[in-house]
Amino acid sequence: MSEERLRKYIRKEIKSIFEERDYKKEYEEYHSKPEQKNRRAGRNAARRKMERLGKVKKGDGKDVHHRNRNTSDNSSENLTAIPKSKNRSMK
């Protein structure tokens, strides 16, 4: 790659990093869909359930993990509290 093309590529990448997100558009195109609202409600229900059981608290740095990775299965046996960093790094 020539030096000039490399400079253009780097400028383009830097610009894309610092562009602001369009949250309104993002909500309209993704988060407002009924399917996504139901999934979010299920995740919130799991969190509330674990709060009632005393396993998590607001601001404790923990996520509610679904052991079988089925987020619609909020049975007590399927839920566990783990650190955010561990839960969000799972593949």
Image: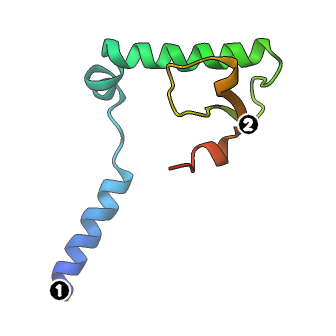
Q: Percent x, y for residue 10?
A: 29, 71
Residue pushed farthest bottom? 2
The N terminus lies in quadrant? bottom left
Q: Percent x, y for residue 31?
A: 36, 22
Please name the colour scheme applied to the rendered image. Answer: rainbow
Residue type at mark 2: give it: Gly
Q: Percent x, y for residue 59?
A: 75, 29
Q: CA distance from mark 1 to mark 2?
A: 45 Å
Q: Name the residue located 32 percent from the left edge and 33 percent from the top edge.
A: 22
Q: Neighbour class for label 1 at 10 Å: few (<14), some, many (≥20)?
A: few
Residue type at mark 1: give it: Met
Q: Name the residue located 16 percent from the left edge and 88 percent from the top edge.
A: 2
Q: Is residue 43 left or right of residue 80?
A: left
Say what secondary structure mark 2 lies in.
Answer: loop
Q: Which residue is mark 2?
A: 61
Q: Nearer the viewer, residue 61 or 78?
A: 78
Q: Percent x, y for residue 55?
A: 80, 24
Q: Is residue 39 left or right of residue 67?
A: left
